[in-house]
Image: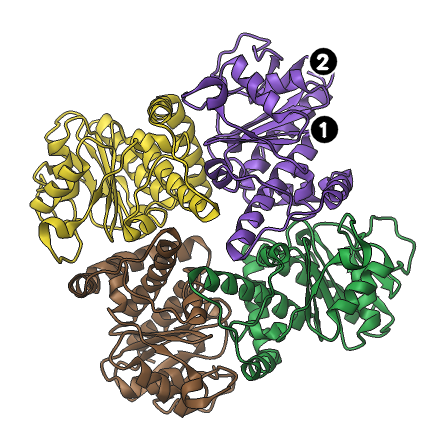
Chain colours: A brown, B green, C purple, D yellow
């Protein structure tokens, strides 16, 4: 394995643990990154709690979500979420799926989440809502079949995030760090939207503000500053991945 | 004591501490497991805060909740909850009783908790509500007499969880790890149900979804992944039981 | 100093730190105990954040809240709360005054707190409400003058806890550990009452239930179990007082 | 560098980390202090997450927010908030800008925050509301241009704190420790105001109470006690700045 590949596996393990440490993941949730040299493949951990993922747990998958090497370990049953989005969205470099407490009330109430502050604008002006019953009726709610992943990818469309009824959210990014930034601040945005509604009323950013604030905060200097902060917090918690 | 028996006592101490570390127990609450070789007995700690329970604290009780050996320590006054449920439900291997902050608002408001996300579906489609006043009028709310435990067991019926008015909840499982999984995700479910109501409205899973999602998430691979995660969190907190 | 006196100072430092660690105190709040050999005196820390109080910080005061020895350190300006209550209530052995986040919404909204679960019943069936404007008009809200402390003590009457408008709460106990137990579970009770109201409605314990549940949970076995738990949590946080 | 200047840089790094540790800052937010010997300059960190700021990161700026020495590091883009307020308010010695979760619901709902308890009164009886659209229409919401900073300073007027629509808050103080005290207790005040509204209704302090309680709690003995507490908490978290 080249050093660059080893670094990417380490970075992906770190992203798993940061998202868990910042309360986006719990025992469940997963994050992937597109293969930097072969866009028809992606990297994703074997099935385990994200806060435990190590670089050695990272496996390669085709866009049909088949493991490139025969696996000796258990795989996430929902990996088609990643494969089908990477297929449908050549611009996407990283994908995460989660059940963060911040978004669950929206997934359960069927309420739209809208950008309510400048950092939340990085999730995009529109977050579509996917209801698995529309295409598939009653299911166990897991997104396991390729056609279920494809249906979710269609609902996502050209947006950056999609809510999943009674289930959680899926978020995409043009880089792994951008994805982590967007996933975390979309959770903060959902929390503030909910609190503003409880207090009085929700006033969203204007369309112009959402575009301008989203663009400026997706610049690398914002996500670099935040990444350094989240790594420090992970270090303090004793949660850094082994090299 | 056989190694297997020692392992079970350690596992039960671990379950006590995980449930405390995940905010299901505080200074109060208790969890038991049926004796693996003698279904007419069960194992339960002596009376102490669950986060402090050690393997040596675990005692054996008959289904009438009498200690098998004369005790030199104080016992939980509410152990009939365990004995009477083990009597009434031969399929049950583990029982826990708690006052988690997540369920208390439902116990106080008299509101039903319903499955609102796929992992919450493991608590079952129906959670009955037990009001001690129906059979006993004004009491100190503790479930101490055999007939009080039997009344609670009747209210539980064939379900997996029962809410207790002004008091808390009791949860059962077909294994100790399944019980821990169900107890924790039922708390998350209650939190999300409450938040969804504050946000807008509560939409429950359909009956079909609840059955399918409950069944898939009670498979051992889900509780194994979560158990590894909760043990890691307990280790980080410095809270592992002594061997 | 006798060993017994040294032990009591240590126990009072511990009570300070437990109440801070359990989120009853922050930088402010104070807890006192009546002198075990001379009921006309009480023990209270010099002015500092409770989580920092050491046995050496504990001073003796007369019931007029004058320091028995000329002090070389700063004193809490609100110590008349303790002195005036010890005067008015010979049955009271310990007093604490706090601004816990759990009770502040009730102090601000002017809403009554009522027992909503068995452990919360230890605060008593009735928690009166004291508004400093009734006797004193606009003040800086601190209870500093003897007549302000006496007014608060009158509002407390024969109850175990009193809410103070725009300020916080004062709680009393028949022993230091009972006081700590009552103060902490009164906060949990306030949190659950608030959550139940947000969910649907608040149903209080019946008068009979409140009396029975309050009495059983003020028995030493409950507060001993909880004390062991809170000390363990304080130890884990690295917050034990020096001997 | 004189010892006094080194001490001030250390104190400012400490203020950064305390405000982060107390949940006022996250990856974003910044705090400055006026130069003690030259009132036409101020001290502010280079651009990085506040919880990571070290004394060596502190730079000097003119009131036009130009770095006094050519910088080799990235600067906060919003430093005009500090410069323009120091220009407009000779009485101000310290400034902080934040997006604390406690204030965001007010910034989003457009709801006024009012003093609801004695320590919250330190934020002043009136907290004005600044909407960047009034002067500038749709922007990315960052306060980057001198005229944007000047507009915010005008909205602040002679008050101690200003809310910024869809963005956060800016707070000022007559000393660094006073500013930290005010910023933290204004957050607690916002939380309690929100909770009181959810419970029933918000009753603010009277004008007289707000003035008296604000004045007494801005005395150094209150902020000294709290500062010792916050430093202890920062130490426990392993977050003290290097000397």
| Residue B30 can be seen, yes or no | yes
Q: Are marks 2 and 1 in contact (CB under 8 Å)?
A: no
Quote the CA–CA distance across marks 2 and 1: 16 Å
For mark 1, give the secondary structure: loop
Q: Residues within 10 Å of mark 1 (few under 14, many from 20)?
A: some
Say the numbered circle drawn on residue A116: none
Left or right of A65? Residue B52 is right
Residue D144 versus residue B31 in the image, above or below: above
Q: Which residue is outermost to the top?
A: C70
- Residue D165, given in percent of the width and then of the height, sits at 23, 50
Left or right of B159? Residue D66 is left
Q: Residue at x 60, y 9 (%)?
A: C68
Give C222 or B139, whichever is nearer the viewer: B139
Say the numbered circle drawn on residue C38: 2
Say the numbered circle drawn on residue C174: 1
For mark 2, give the secondary structure: loop
- The answer to which of marks 2 and 1 sits earlier in the sequence is 2
Q: Are marks 2 and 1 on the same chain?
A: yes
- Residue C183, given in percent of the width and then of the height, sits at 61, 36
């Amino acid at each position: 394995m080249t050093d660059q590949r080893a670094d990417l596996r380490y970075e992906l393990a770190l992203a798993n643990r940061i998202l868990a440490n910042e309360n986006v993941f719990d025992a469940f949730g997963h994050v992937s990154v597109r293969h930097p040299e072969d866009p028809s493949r992606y990297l994703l951990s074997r099935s385990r709690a994200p806060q435990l993922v190590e670089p050695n747990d990272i496996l390669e998958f085709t866009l049909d979500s088949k493991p490139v090497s025969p696996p000796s370990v258990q795989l996430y049953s929902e990996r088609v979420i990643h494969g089908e989005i990477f297929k449908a969205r050549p611009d996407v470099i990283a994908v995460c799926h989660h059940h963060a407490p911040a978004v669950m009330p929206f997934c359960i109430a069927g309420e739209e989440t809208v950008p309510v502050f400048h950092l939340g604008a990085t999730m995009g002006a529109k977050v579509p809502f996917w209801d698995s019953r529309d295409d598939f009726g009653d299911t166990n709610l897991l997104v396991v079949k390729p056609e279920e992943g494809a249906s979710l990818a269609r609902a996502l469309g050209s947006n950056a995030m999609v809510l999943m009824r009674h289930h959680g959210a899926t978020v995409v990014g043009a880089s792994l760090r951008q994805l982590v930034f967007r996933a975390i601040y979309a959770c903060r945005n959902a929390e503030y939207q909910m609190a503003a509604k409880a207090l009085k009323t929700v006033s969203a950013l204007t369309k112009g503000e959402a575009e301008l604030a989203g663009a400026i905060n997706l610049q690398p200097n914002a996500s670099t500053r935040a990444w350094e902060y989240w790594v420090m917090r992970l270090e303090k918690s004793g949660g850094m991945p082994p090299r």
